[in-house]
Image (cartoon, rainbow, N blue to C red):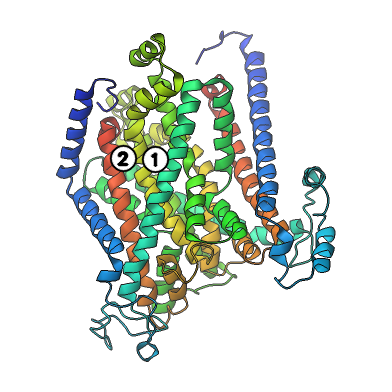
């Protein structure tokens, strides 16, 4: 259903079917709505957040959430060890998480798509070299590679995005390559070749559109992985610098106060989990829609 | 696939085929390791001048030159690289800048703690994932299946450090049943092992479920059922074994996840393993140690996957003739 190539009508029908399937799935709707809210919060963070996320107020430090004993309605989710408003920090933290997740997935997707197209379509030694490179890449736990690179090159938002992008391309490349392997012998490719269309044009015009659906699925799941990876790096103190608010950094601070102030660690952890879960649910639904066979099994 | 003639000729042919398959796989693992070693070497040097990273900003040029010479960094890159490669088989990777000992020795003292943690986590993962995956496959499409799959999705969305912090909050801070961190008896191992296991539980349960569903729909299971075999006999006698091959592969890949997860888990629980050592080494700019740690992680991953690969080359004859 999805891989019907060349003729636009079935492709459009497939997309409409996909849209209907997503709309039918209530869980997917909830997940997508949650993500939409997150995006709005992140984009308009300075307007929505009640406080400056860096503003300290030592008189109200470690204040519990509003509903708990000793809570204060002025700080609905409480305050941290420096009296900073947790809700405001959560809202600002969403910016880094979503930006890193989306940008890293995009970068990895572009690299992976190019590698997969070349490996699958050209074949021969480029294929062998690229796939061996993929094995080498997989031999490094990506978090370790990211740690090593960030540790030596320096930390910073763009380094983190770059590292997660450059370490995440393998699964895209493998998916694209296997799709291309089955597409390259189809008529619309062999005929394009027969009338003299160049390799690059075939890859761009005829193959790429047909691998977009699996690419999007892998990409969505990678967004969640990148969000978690950024939080992990920031938790270890090797991600985005401390001055920028991140959920991972908040968790790292919060762990020190687990015994007295659970809310400092629990809220950023929940935010992280809900975001990753929503992205994963969306990706799962995309995959089921893109591959109805896998869905039924 | 192409079944060789089933005669006396078969045994020796299968023997040399197996030998060749094993040799190819070992060789390709060595090639991967060589690339990893090269990448680790250049990664550390690409990052600019390690001497500048190690010394404080106000160090004199003379101090820089002394350190550079003592680390061998004043020699041509190609000479450094050849020396490095020559040292690899002897595990000679230079001295740690912080511990002032050979990095191999520093690493090896931390290996047992990480192995203990990873082994315990893998055991926990299998103990939870195998029944959960089997149960979901048998209840396919029903509430039990949905429940397990929802758990899988949540498990995959929980970063290890967040799970660890939650477990500490509940079992160490609130209930005070278990210690929050540190290294010691079995009580110290429980929370870190569960933390590290969780992600693998999700991956293994999910895979076992789909693999079992495939097997349960196959002809020989229908035959077994037609003979009157009960569900227990079908699952334990015929299906699990056949569904286990992809699962064994993934367990190999999970070793990478476990090692990566160990970096975070060890930090959460102050576990004195390789992961914590690596994070500290990176923070301290102890580049020979970082280089060695990267190699260690990669080599472990490659070797475990080689063993997994070889094990089913031996177990499943179809894999040999690819």
Task: Give residue B79's position: percent from left, percent from top.
Answer: 82, 44
In the rendered image, which residue does mark 1 sit on?
B208
Q: Pick the residue in front: B199 or A243.
A: A243
Residue A253, compared with residue A136, is above or below; it is: below
The reply to whether the C-beta atoms of the residues labelled 2 and 1 are less than 8 Å apart is yes
Residue A238 figure quarter? bottom right
Task: Give residue A183's position: percent from left, percent from top.
Answer: 38, 20
Residue A267 visible in this rendered orientation of the protein: no
Quick one: label 1, few (<14), some, or many (20+) residues within 10 Å?
many
Which tag, 2 or 1, sits closer to the chain's start? 2
Measured Cα–Cα span from mark 2 to mark 1:
8 Å
Q: Pick the residue in front: B221 or B187.
A: B187
Task: Give residue B245's position: percent from left, percent from top.
Answer: 47, 34
Task: Give residue B284's position: percent from left, percent from top.
Answer: 66, 67
Residue B149 appears left or right of A156: left
Query: Image point 55% across, 29% down: which residue?
Result: B315
Residue A183, compared with residue A227, is above or below; it is: above
> Which chain letter matches label 1?
B
Residue B150 appears left or right of B73: left
Q: Quadrant of the N terminus of chain A?
A: top left
Residue B264, compared with residue A5, is above or below; it is: below
């Amino acid at each position: 259903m999805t891989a019907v190539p060349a003729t636009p009508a079935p492709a459009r029908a497939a997309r409409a079917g996909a849209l209907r399937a997503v709309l039918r799935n209530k869980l997917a709707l909830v997940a997508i709505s949650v993500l939409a809210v997150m995006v709005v919060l992140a984009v308009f963070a300075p307007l929505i957040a009640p406080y400056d996320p860096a503003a300290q107020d030592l008189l109200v430090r470690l204040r519990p959430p509003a509903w708990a004993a000793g809570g204060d309605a002025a700080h609905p989710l409480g305050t941290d060890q420096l009296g900073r408003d947790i809700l405001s920090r959560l809202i600002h933290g969403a910016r880094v998480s979503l930006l890193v997740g989306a940008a890293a997935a995009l970068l990895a997707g572009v690299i992976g798509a190019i590698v997969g197209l070349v490996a699958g379509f050209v074949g021969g030694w480029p294929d062998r070299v690229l796939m061996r490179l993929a094995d080498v890449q997989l031999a490094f736990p990506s978090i370790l590679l990211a740690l090593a690179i960030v540790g030596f090159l320096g930390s910073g938002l763009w380094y983190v995005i770059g590292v997660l992008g450059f370490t995440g391309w393998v699964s895209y490349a493998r998916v694209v390559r296997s799709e291309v392997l089955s597409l390259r012998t189809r008529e619309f490719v062999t005929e394009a070749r027969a009338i003299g269309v160049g390799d690059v044009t075939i890859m761009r015009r005829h193959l790429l559109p047909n691998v977009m659906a699996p690419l999007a699925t892998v990409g969505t799941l990678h967004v969640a992985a990148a969000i978690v990876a950024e939080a992990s790096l920031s938790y270890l103190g090797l991600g985005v610098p401390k001055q920028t608010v991140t959920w991972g950094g908040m968790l790292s601070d919060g762990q020190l106060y687990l015994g007295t102030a659970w809310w400092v660690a629990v809220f950023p952890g929940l935010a992280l989990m809900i975001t990753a879960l929503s992205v994963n649910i969306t990706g799962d639904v995309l995959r089921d829609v893109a591959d109805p066979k896998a869905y039924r099994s | 696939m192409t079944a060789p003639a089933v005669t006396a000729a078969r045994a020796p042919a299968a023997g040399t085929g197996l030998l060749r398959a094993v040799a190819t796989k070992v060789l390709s693992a060595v090639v991967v390791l060589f690339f990893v070693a090269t990448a680790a070497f250049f990664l550390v040097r690409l990052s600019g001048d390690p001497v500048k990273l190690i010394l404080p900003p106000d160090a004199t040029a003379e101090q820089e030159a002394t350190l550079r010479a003592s680390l061998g960094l004043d020699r041509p890159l190609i000479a450094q690289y050849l020396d490095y490669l020559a040292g690899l088989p002897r595990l000679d990777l230079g001295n740690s800048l912080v511990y002032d000992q050979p990095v191999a020795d520093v690493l090896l003292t931390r290996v047992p703690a990480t192995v203990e943690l990873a082994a315990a986590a893998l055991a926990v993962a299998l103990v939870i994932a195998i029944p959960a995956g089997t149960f979901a496959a048998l209840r396919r499409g029903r509430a039990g299946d949905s429940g397990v799959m929802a758990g899988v999705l949540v498990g995959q969305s929980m970063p290890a450090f967040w799970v660890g912090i939650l477990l500490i909050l509940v079992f160490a801070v609130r209930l005070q049943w278990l210690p929050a961190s540190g290294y010691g008896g079995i009580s110290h191992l429980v929370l870190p092992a569960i933390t590290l296991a969780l992600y693998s539980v999700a991956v293994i349960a999910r895979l076992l479920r789909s693999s079992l569903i495939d097997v349960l729909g196959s002809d020989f299971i229908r035959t077994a059922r037609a003979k009157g075999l009960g569900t227990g006999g079908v699952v334990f006698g015929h299906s699990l074994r056949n569904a286990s091959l992809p699962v064994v592969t993934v367990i190999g890949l999970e070793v990478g996840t476990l090692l990566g997860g160990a970096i975070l888990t060890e930090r959460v629980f102050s576990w004195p393993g390789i992961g914590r050592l690596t994070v500290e080494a990176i923070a301290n700019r102890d580049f020979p140690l970082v280089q060695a740690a990267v190699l260690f992680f990669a080599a472990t991953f490659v070797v475990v996957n080689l063993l997994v690969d070889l094990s089913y080359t031996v177990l499943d004859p179809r894999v040999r003739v690819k």
